[in-house]
Image: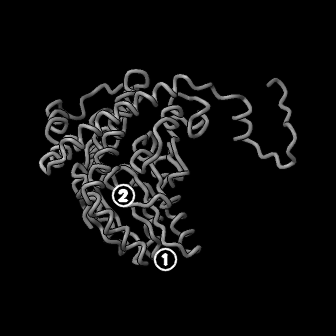
């Protein structure tokens, strides 16, 4: 099912919101921006989902809530460590989430979201709804045991889960060629009886089409699908991680930035379809929304001690918990 013109503009909006959100953080929060370069894969996949479908992300995956349609201001405030953040400033960049949009979690544990999405799929099956669960993970997570255990279980029980690998070719600095005996992640589905699909992660509509087909299959009881989106990370895995050697050339990075930028590629596609005026309006609206989100974050209050205590302890008796020295 192809996207109609209004949905095409929505897809571009989500991609641009991810890009501008990350760019706004770079000066003050230079920790590595995992979504820059991945916008087509993230937003394209999320456009195939409903609000009540579940998603798990990776670490520092700021783009996944935005791709699902989350509000920017609470996400920005979370990264600024403020009380108005989506997790009251207690989750931060590593554990950003938005349960209102079906985001179960994002985790610093490599592959940590894969079994959680599988469990969500089991919950869907037990409850008898037609929801699906989609888990994002990188190529490095494919060598974790949780990937194999989860996809095997989902295959046996025909769970409504989409396993979505954002394969950018590098696990920090280790190339796929040095860590995978089979470089095409999608082919690993063969061993578990799960369809494997390879898609160009820089082509947002192609990602949507592949994910939508997997979603419809899952909703109808057909079981899981493994999607591998071939994408690219423009920035470092972490800008705070000193890397004493060159693991990719300047020419390689420049090629992807200049020739394979998913935001630019999709903008050109939509412009060629006569949607230039709509694109200009979106760009202005996104710029204003990002500016407002940053100001909201800066103006918001810091978390309070009680917020931390409420997140650590259960107090069913409903009287104040006394903690000496606090």
Residue in the picture at 41% in, 29% down: 31
Q: Residue 311 carries which label?
A: none
Judged from the image, the secondary structure of the residue bearing numbered disc 2 is strand
Residue in the picture at 73% in, 40% down: 310
Image spot of residue 15 (x, y percent)? 31, 44
Judged from the image, the secondary structure of the residue bearing numbered disc 1 is helix
Q: In this view, does 34 lie above or below 192?
A: above
Q: Name the residue under label 1.
A: 157
Label 2 close to label 1 by CB (< 8 Å): no
Left or right of 268: which side holds 234?
A: right
Q: Is residue 283 above or below residue 12?
A: above
Q: How far apart are marks 2 and 1 (CA)?
A: 19 Å
Q: Quadrant of the N terminus?
A: bottom left
Q: In which quarter of the image is the C terminus?
A: top right
Q: In this view, does 313 lie above or below 130?
A: above
Residue in the picture at 58% in, 74% down: 126
Residue in the picture at 85% in, 27% down: 324
Is residue 167 visible to the viewer in this orientation of the structure?
no
Q: Who comes first in sequence, dot 2 or dot 1?
A: 1
Image spot of residue 217 (x, y percent)? 36, 74
Q: Residue 164 carries which label?
A: 2
Question: Which residue is the extreme one toward the left?
Answer: 272
Image spot of residue 26 (x, y percent)? 37, 26
């Amino acid at each position: 099912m192809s996207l109609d013109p209004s949905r095409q503009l929505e897809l571009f909006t989500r991609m641009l919101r991810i890009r501008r959100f990350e760019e706004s953080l770079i000066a003050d929060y230079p920790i590595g921006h995992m979504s820059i370069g991945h916008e087509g894969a993230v937003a394209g996949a999320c456009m195939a989902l409903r609000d009540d479908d579940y998603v798990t992300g990776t670490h520092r995956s700021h783009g996944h809530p935005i791709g699902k349609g989350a509000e920017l201001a609470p996400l920005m405030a979370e990264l600024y460590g403020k009380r108005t953040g989506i997790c009251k400033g207690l989750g931060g960049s590593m554990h950003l989430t938005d349960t209102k949009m079906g985001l179960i979690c994002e985790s610093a544990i490599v592959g940590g979201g894969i079994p959680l999405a599988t469990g969500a799929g089991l919950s869907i099956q037990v409850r008898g709804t037609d929801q699906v669960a989609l888990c994002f993970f990188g190529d490095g997570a494919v060598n974790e045991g949780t990937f194999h255990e989860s996809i095997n279980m989902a295959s046996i029980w025909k769970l409504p889960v989409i396993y979505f690998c954002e394969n950018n070719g590098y696990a920090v600095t280790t190339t796929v060629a040095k860590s995978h005996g089979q470089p095409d992640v999608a082919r690993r589905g063969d061993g578990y009886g799960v369809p494997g699909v390879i898609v160009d992660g820089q082509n947002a509509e192609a990602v949507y089409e592949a994910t939508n087909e997997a979603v419809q299959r899952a909703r109808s009881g057909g079981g899981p699908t493994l999607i591998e989106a071939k994408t690219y990370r423009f920035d470092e895995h972490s800008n705070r991680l000193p890397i004493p050697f060159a693991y990719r050339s300047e020419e390689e990075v420049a090629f992807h930035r200049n020739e394979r930028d998913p935001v630019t590629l999709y903008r050109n596609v939509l412009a060629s379809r006569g949607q230039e005026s709509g694109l200009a309006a979106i760009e202005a609206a996104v710029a204003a929304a990002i500016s407002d989100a940053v100001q909201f974050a800066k103006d918001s209050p810091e978390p309070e001690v009680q917020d931390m205590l409420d997140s650590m302890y259960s107090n069913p008796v409903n009287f104040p918990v006394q903690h000496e020295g606090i």
